[in-house]
């Protein structure tokens, strides 16, 4: 692999950047792999990377129906935080956040992690109380987070409407200074380049059309590029996971819905932190290009079309104009939707299944991007050792049957 | 997406609230060995990619419970009926 550095940049500048090698190969699938990962989004590529790096499993393939990073990895609003309520969630999200801190060095790829601080607004007494509870839980877990008052909210984010007469006045905020944003495409590309360098085959435009079993054990996958023999299949396909594991006869407690986001025209820097306003259903940050990146609540019905309802966007924008009056005349440049997989308790599923050799990592709902490195790390360990990683164990499929839910519907950023 | 309510006619989807799969059958037994049926009913979802029957509530209109036959990939609606008729006939 051609390492990226100031020297390689200078060397290539002399040649007008004509000689950069491709960041990853585009190989044809081999007939047999030790493990096949379905879905080349952030989670799938991170899983492949850590399987190769930590567990020396290099005869593996990542299959992708479209192009890598083209699903929810490229459709989220890039927020990274770990201030969840339950201990199990704190463990995995904080693992992910801490891995993000030196991911650029780890991958030799600039993932543009920007710990600019995440503020979660408290706009009703109930919300204030709920976040205080989360703050105490996080403090016990050793997270660097704190409650801040209205004056500090205004100092950190001067464009916010802090009028006490607002429909939903700012009563304070829950602040994680080490949270922030990252460059979502770079995370996918960095992991892809890293995994490819370790020998992983990333096969794009390769759709899985069937899973073959012998008794209770998987034996391979049918794909649009032929049959691939393997004893381990890891499905990491977000909103399409249900449809894929169905091929092996496994049902999941998951429903797919559309979550939309939008960006404004680029403007000068006005907000240098991430603001999430759960009561009014909207969150906002500013990209390095100057666009305001805005997200809101998920649509309330099943959807596989990557296209959401206009009413949800209208709702989000209305709320944000109330919270940030200066954005009222901005033009919105692009809107898009991603299909997120929701579980009943809004926590993910990282699990083995009743079918031997079939592993699932899904149900991340609206919180997938922030968890990519942690999810890949523990899922790789689960696949390599054929037993759940201690951090992944509470997120097993059996938690539903056992009534051991990890309820994060309050801590999640948006209504759904 | 516009839904044709049998009572109110074609109305925009923001007047409606979706309550998910209408084909689920609530188990009638409380015996311990029917826990798998309860597990399926409470948690497992077919999450169909394509046509499915869903409960929709016309919450911003006549407040009747409807069953809508809808494609989750294209949002095409093939039929709407009341939940009462659906339960009697078993189809939309």
Image: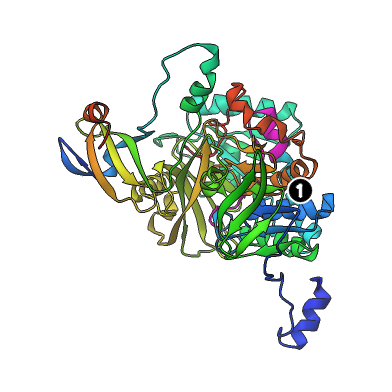
Q: Where does residue A3 sit, x and y in percent of width and height?
A: 81, 71
Query: Callout 1 environment at 10 Å: few (<14), some (14 to 19), or many (20+)?
Result: some
Q: Quadrant of the N terminus of chain A?
A: bottom right
On whether residue A86 falls in the magenta region, the answer is yes
Q: Where does residue A179 sit, x and y in percent of width and height?
A: 67, 45
In the image, taking residue A198 as reference, residue A40 lies left or right, namely left
Residue at the spot 52% in from the left edge and 28% down from the top edge: A127
Q: Where does residue A136 sit, x and y in percent of width and height?
A: 68, 25
On whether residue A150 falls in the magenta region, the answer is no
Q: Residue furthest bottom?
A: A15
**Is residue A158 at least partly visible in the picture?**
no
Depth check, front residue: A111 or A21: A21
Question: Residue at label 1?
Answer: A99
Relative height, residue A395 to residue A111 (above, below): above
At mark 1, the secondary structure is helix
Q: Chain of mark 1?
A: A
Depth check, front residue: A72 or A31: A31
Relative height, residue A85 to residue A153 (above, below): above
Q: Residue furthest front?
A: A215
In the image, taking residue A112 as reference, residue B32 lies left or right, namely left
Residue at the spot 74% in from the left edge and 29% down from the top edge: A141
The residues colored magenta run A75-93
**Is residue A95 at least partly visible in the picture?**
yes
Residue at the spot 47% in from the left edge and 43% down from the top edge: A256
Q: Where does residue B26 sit, x and y in percent of width and height?
A: 40, 22
Relative height, residue B61 to residue A21 (above, below): above
């Amino acid at each position: 692999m051609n390492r990226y550095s100031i020297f390689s940049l200078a060397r290539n500048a002399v040649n007008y950047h004509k000689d950069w090698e491709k960041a990853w190969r585009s190989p044809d699938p081999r007939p047999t792999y030790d493990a096949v990962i379905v879905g080349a989004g952030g989670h799938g590529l991170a899983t492949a990377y850590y399987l190769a790096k930590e567990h020396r499993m290099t005869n593996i393939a990542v299959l992708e129906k479209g192009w890598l990073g083209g699903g929810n990895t490229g459709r989220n609003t890039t927020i990274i935080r770990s201030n969840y309520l339950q201990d199990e969630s704190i463990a995995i999200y904080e693992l992910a956040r801490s891995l993000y801190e030196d991911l650029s060095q780890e991958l030799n790829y600039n993932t543009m992690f920007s710990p600019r601080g995440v503020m979660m607004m408290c706009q009703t007494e109930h919300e204030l109380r709920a976040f205080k509870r989360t703050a105490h839980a996080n403090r016990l877990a050793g997270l660097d987070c704190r409650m801040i008052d209205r004056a500090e909210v205004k100092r950190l984010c001067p464009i916010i409407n802090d009028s006490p007469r607002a429909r939903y006045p700012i009563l304070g905020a829950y602040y994680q200074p080490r949270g922030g944003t990252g460059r979502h495409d770079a995370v996918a590309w960095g992991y892809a380049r890293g995994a490819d360098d370790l020998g992983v085959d990333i096969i794009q435009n390769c759709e899985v059309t069937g899973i073959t079993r012998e008794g209770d054990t998987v034996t391979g996958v049918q794909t649009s590029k032929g049959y691939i023999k393997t004893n381990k299949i890891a499905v990491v396909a977000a909103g399409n996971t249900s449809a894929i594991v169905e091929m092996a006869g496994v049902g999941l407690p998951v429903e797919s819905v559309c979550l939309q986001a939008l960006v404004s025209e680029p403007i000068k820097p006005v907000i240098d932190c991430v603001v999430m306003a759960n009561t009014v259903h909207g969150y906002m940050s500013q990209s390095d290009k100057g666009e305001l990146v805005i997200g809101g609540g998920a649509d309330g019905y099943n959807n596989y079309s990557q296209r959401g309802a206009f009413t949800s966007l209208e709702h989000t924008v209305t709320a944000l104009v109330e919270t940030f009056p200066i954005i009222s005349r901005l033009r919105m440049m692009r809107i898009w939707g991603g299909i997120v997989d929701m579980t009943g308790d809004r926590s993910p599923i990282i699990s083995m299944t009743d079918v031997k050799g079939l592993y699932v990592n899904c149900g991340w709902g609206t919180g997938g991007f922030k968890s990519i490195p942690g999810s890949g790390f523990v899922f790789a360990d689960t696949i390599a050792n054929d037993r759940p990683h201690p951090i992944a164990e509470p997120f097993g499929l059996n938690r539903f049957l056992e009534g051991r839910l990890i309820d994060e519907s309050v801590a999640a950023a948006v209504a759904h | 997406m516009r839904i044709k309510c049998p009572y109110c006619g074609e109305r925009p989807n923001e007047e409606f609230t979706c309550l998910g799969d209408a084909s689920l059958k609530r188990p009638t037994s409380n015996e311990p060995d029917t826990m798998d049926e309860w597990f399926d009913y409470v948690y497992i979802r077919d999450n169909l990619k394509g046509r499915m029957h869903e409960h929709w509530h016309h919450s911003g209109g006549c407040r009747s419970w409807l069953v809508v036959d809808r494609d989750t990939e294209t949002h095409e609606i093939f039929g709407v009926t009341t939940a009462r008729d659906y339960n009697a006939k078993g189809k939309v």
